[in-house]
Image (tube, rainbow, N blue to C red):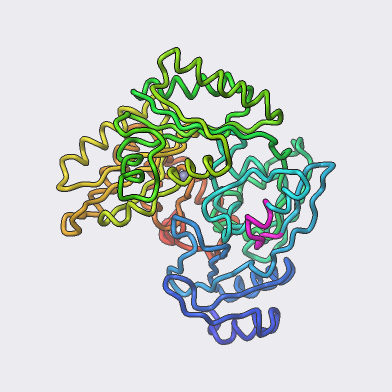
Amino acid sequence: MAESTAGVLAQLREVLGESGVRDTPDDNLPDIILKPETTEQVSQVLKICSAAQQALVPLGGKTGLANGHFQTGSEFGLSLERMNAIEEIDPHNRTMTVQAGCILQVATEAAEEQGLLLPLDLGARGSATVGGNVATNAGGNMVIRYGMTRDMVLGLEVVLADGTVVTNLNKLLKNNTGYDLRQWFIGAEGTLGVITRVVFRLRPQPKSQNTALLAVDKFADVAALLHRLDSQTAGTLSAFEVMWPEFYEFVTREEGMHKAPLPHGSAHYVLVETQGSEPEADAERFENVLSDAMEAGLIADAVLTHSQAERNALWEIRDDVLGFFSLGPIVPFDISVTIDQMEPFVEDIRSAAARLDDSICVFFGHLGDSNLHVILGNREPANFDYEAIQELLYGTVEKYQGSVSAEHGIGLSKRDQLHRSRSDAELQLMVGLKQMLDPQNILNPNKIFTAAQIASA
Ligand code: ZN
């Protein structure tokens, strides 16, 4: 029998103090938010909640795109915002030890001050927390070069559902000692444990940056160009972002905010960037590789940037996604298919969308990471059918054996699509892990799996 909410809250106030328990009604977010200041307090909170079968939603910056931070019942929120210290930057070992509630941008700027790079960058950098980034295995703008968040985490401290603190603040690059427990919690979206501290691997801060926008006539050339740049830029390729004409021409339309750096009418627009350590040699190599590719017929037209302002202008075009919401009701998708399947995938979606009335269908994405963002919708709200659009998109992802979530995670919004990208054996193993670590299903219930899926397995 679960204890009364008032009784549980009284115990929590005793541990956290008055300022550590907030009652803040907010759409979709839990009404009651707990704000521990130490790992020990997180452990006490979980012990109390475990005994009372009180569910919790771990909260970071609440910037996730899969609704993993939403309340689904009577959960309390568990915000790590007061655990935001950078505990150590170790320049010798190139590591950073940081508390989960630290804002991503604060962490990346602290690394930069030491001449080091925390290679995680995404639009929500100013409000996302590193704990949330790790819990959701965030992707972002540098994945092609440095991998996703899970590739830069060396150590973790996690509090389990029963309050057990598991501390492994490992700084070793090589540590091959049994099961890699870190990876259970990275990308688990707070369903297996609460991340309280993280050790990140840092890299040297790049000294050069070269950026260009390319026009490419056909998709086969885009794929060939990716391989060519990857092998000829000496490991410095850090971005390969592709925009289809529906994207590029809309954000650079005459009445829009951005001037078109290249004329409309091409089949693809590719933003490429390298980051290296030798400014002159890197710039020369970049220009040579591009002019060779142009001679080989892979590039139809190109603009190279010569200042930070010009570089920013190109990235602003690529990042200008919000304008599409003014066209009508739309759904932004975040999926993966392999590069060799991408062209038929896009054609399938495009022709299916064309059969819908006044449809909106836009493609862009991090092609170097096989990650495609698709926007589907209708100009006329009356024609908008969310279920049909989801079926169209995810059915096609399944057909091409792609992933229903490339970088945003599963949360609530893709939970019912997970089976399309994971086998029954995989799903069973995941549910088994959840049952072992959180037998009462108090950690972020209904995310990734429904409570019923967990209970019935
Ligand atoms: Zn993205």
Whether 101 is among the magenta residues is: yes
Give me the residue at 50% from left, 32% from top: 212
On the image, the x and y values in percent for residue 111 come to 73, 49
Depicted 145 relative to depicted 49: above or below: above
Give me the residue at 41% from left, 45% from top: 334
From the viewer's perspective, tell me whether residue 331 is left or right of residue 70: left
On the image, the x and y values in percent for residue 285 come to 61, 21
Depth order, front residue of 429/154: 154
Q: Which residues are magenta?
A: 99-108
Depth order, front residue of 70/291: 291
Depth order, front residue of 297/303: 303
From the viewer's perspective, tell me whether residue 51 is left or right of residue 350: right
From the viewer's perspective, tell me whether residue 92 is left or right of residue 381: right
| Number of numbered callouts drawn | 0
Depicted 307 relative to depicted 450: above or below: above
Residue 427 in view: no
Give me the residue at 35% from left, 46% from top: 251
Depth order, front residue of 15/138: 138
Give me the residue at 45% from left, 47% from top: 319
On the image, the x and y values in percent for residue 267 come to 32, 29
Residue 449 in view: yes
Pick out the residue farthest to the top. 296
Q: Quadrant of residue 128?
A: bottom right
